[in-house]
Image (cartoon, rainbow, N blue to C red):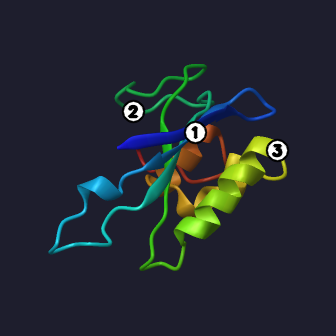
Amino acid sequence: MKIIERAVMPNGTEIQLEDWREHNSEKCPDLYGFEIGAYPVARRTGKYRLVRERDNFRLSIASNIYSGYTIEQLKADYEALKSGDITLEDLAPHFWNGEKDMFYLGMTVQDNDY
């Protein structure tokens, strides 16, 4: 993985643009692409306390050509996060850990024993 750029969102959340393509193989040439790695403050504690309220945790947003979320779209979203035009919550449909990350952020989701 290569870190392309680091930035801080207007709300103080650290983010970075990452290139994971070096992990692709001939058999799976499009498995990995770009990711946004974000480190927001958790608003909830997880069941096993790996993520704790008021501590930073890693939230990944990955490009995925199979779901139609391209590297170009991800890069545009990264720029929009940097400028404050969008928030992490706006990108919830692309969270790697889906509702679990939404739960940690304090978004309205059912507690599914996270």
Type of the residue with mark 3:
Ser
Q: Earlier in the sequence, mark 3 or mark 1?
A: 1
Quadrant where the image shows the N terminus: top left
Q: CA distance from mark 2 to mark 1?
A: 33 Å
Q: Are marks 2 and 3 in contact (CB under 8 Å)?
A: no
Looking at the rendered structure, the kind of residue marked 1 is Glu
Closest to the observer, 59 or 14: 14
* Residue at (44% x, 50% y) in the render: 112
Q: Is residue 56 above or below residue 64?
A: above
Q: Secondary structure at mark 3?
A: helix
- Residue corresponding to mark 2: 47
Q: Nearer the viewer, mark 3 or mark 1?
A: 1
Secondary structure state at the residue bearing disc 1: strand
> What is the C-alpha distance between the residues marked 3 and 1?
14 Å
Q: What is the crowding at mark 1: few (fewer than 14 residues within 10 Å), some, or many (at least 20)?
A: few
Mark 2 or mark 3, whichever is nearer to me = 3
Q: Are marks 3 and 1 in contact (CB under 8 Å)?
A: no
Q: Is residue 28 left or right of residue 97?
A: left
Task: Give the residue at the far left of this rendering.
Answer: 27
Q: Residue at x 65, y 40 (%)?
A: 106
The circle drawn on residue 26 is none
Q: Position of residue 44 (x, y in %)?
A: 57, 31
Q: Is residue 95 left or right of residue 66?
A: right
Question: Please, what is the three-letter code of the amino acid marked with disc 2?
Answer: Lys
Q: Quick one: SS at disc 2? A: loop
| Residue receiving disc 3 | 83
- According to the picture, the residue beneath numbered tag 1 turns out to be 5
- Left/right placement of residue 98 relative to residue 77 reads left
Dot 2 or dot 3, earlier in sequence? 2
